[in-house]
Amino acid sequence: MLLQVRSDPDVALMRQRVRQAAALAGLGLVEQTKLVTAASELARNTLVHGGGGSVEVTPVSRGATAGLRLRFSDSGPGIPDVELAMTDGWTTAGGLGLGLSGSRRLVHEFALDTVPGQGTTVTIASWAAPTTAPPVWSW
């Protein structure tokens, strides 16, 4: 599914769609919340810093484990100093400076590709907990 991020309502719609897709992929409530939070931060960055862009939402699997991959892309100015941008507290928009670094901590996989003057792509993924049989208790 490809979602456009051109306005605040687009960010809200993206949050809803990501939560639905995460639930369908079998992510638990905590992982859903973490993924939606990261997605919201990255969509906001796509809008504010990249001038808008898109989010590609893709169900993925690794063996019997299901997950969800999100790819945020924009054609904005790019990030001139990725190391600095990934530092907690660093901001260019007057926020808390936790968007990129916080998003990275909330998901299982995080990749950032940026070229100054050409745009940025951030790809994240979260995985459902492997299903296991319930514990057998004996006294």
Image: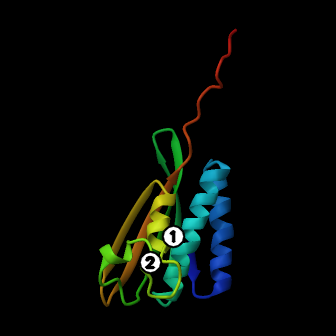
**Which corner quadrant of the image does residue 78 belong to?**
bottom left
Residue on which disc 2 sits: 73
Q: Is residue 69 above or below residue 79?
A: above
Name the residue located 69 percent from the left edge and 68 percent from the top edge.
16
Coloured how?
rainbow
> What residue did someone put label 1 on?
56
Residue 1 visible in the displayed image: no
Under mark 1, the amino acid is Glu
> Crowdedness of circle 2 by 10 Å Cα count: few (<14), some, many (20+)?
many
- Answer yes or no: do the residues labelled 2 and 1 have beta carbons within 8 Å? yes
Q: Given this view, does label 2 or label 1 mark the residue nearer the observer?
A: 2
Q: CA distance from mark 2 to mark 1?
A: 8 Å
- Is residue 23 placed above or below 130 in the rendered structure? below
**Residue 122 quadrant:** bottom left
Classify 41 as above or below 131.
Answer: below
Residue located 58% across and 59% down the image: 34
